Image (tube, rainbow, N blue to C red):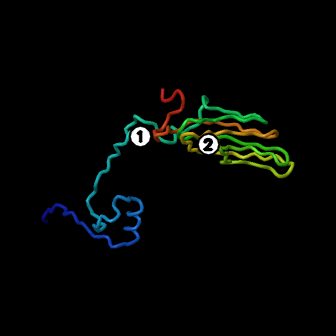
Amino acid sequence: MVNRPSVPEIITVNSEDLQATIRDLLPSQNGFGSELQATNVITPIIDLTATAEGSRLPFELQTAASFGSATEVAAGGTVVMTSTPGWYRFIGSVTVSGSGVTAEFSMTDGLSTKSIWNLTTFTADQISQNVDLIFAVSNGITLSAIAATGSNIVGSFRQIANGQGELVNPVGLPL
């Protein structure tokens, strides 16, 4: 018996569906002009990202709620959450009690105010809603939480990325 080393094979893949998926997922490859190919050679892939090597927290940990970011907006109150550009996450609950009572998050540019998220009850019932919201705040914008009489907003609010999109760790972490 003759011992022959394996010979790599490269096969052209003629699937318009796969090629469309590659073009959608990798826009830089759109119009590249070369056909999609497959090989029988095992190619190791090494993840060289900062998260894989351990110098940066994974996204899920970086965006976690923390003690230092706990915020409560009492009934009948308005709290300016931030006017610093960046991305912010609020994890918590909103409760409204009584007919026509509203609790909301709004943004203003100083000229007009827009309700970004709200919870309103139209009956005398009490409604509680768990929320996990991410806000993008640009230059000149102020984000506020408004709790009308008969409502409250409780949770963790913190910056998860600065205005340049760089992720921000929770206060005091990593140790």
Image coordinates of residue 70 in percent, x first then y, are 64, 32
Q: In what quadrant of the picture does the N terminus appear?
A: bottom left
Most foreground residue, 168 or 83: 83
Image coordinates of residue 96 in percent, x first then y, are 79, 44
Q: Residue 168 carries which label?
A: none
**Count of numbered labels shown in the rendering:** 2
Image coordinates of residue 79 in percent, x first then y, are 69, 34
* Left or right placement of residue 48 versus residue 76 in this view: left
Task: Tell me what residue is drawn at x 83 percent, y 52 percent.
Answer: 122
Most foreground residue, 93 or 102: 102
Q: What element carries label 2?
A: loop
Taking the view exactly as shown, the residue that stands out farthest to the front is 111
Give the residue number, with chain letter if any, for mark 1.
51
Q: Is mark 1 on a helix, strand or loop?
A: helix
Give the CA separation, mark 1 to mark 2: 36 Å
Q: Residue 109 carries which label?
A: 2
Task: Tell me what residue is drawn at x 41 percent, y 59 percent.
Answer: 25
Depth-wise, is mark 1 or mark 2 nearer the camera? 2
* Disc 1 residue type (three-letter): Thr
* Left or right placement of residue 170 versus residue 24 in this view: right
10 Å neighbourhood of mark 1: few (<14), some, or many (≥20)? few
* Left or right placement of residue 20 versus residue 137 in this view: left
Taking the view exactly as shown, the residue that stands out farthest to the right is 124
Looking at the picture, does residue 66 appear above or below residue 138? above
Image coordinates of residue 41 in percent, x first then y, are 26, 59
* Residue 52 position by quadrant: top left
Question: Which of the marked residues, 1 or 2, is nearer the chain's N terminus?
Answer: 1
* Disc 2 residue type (three-letter): Asp
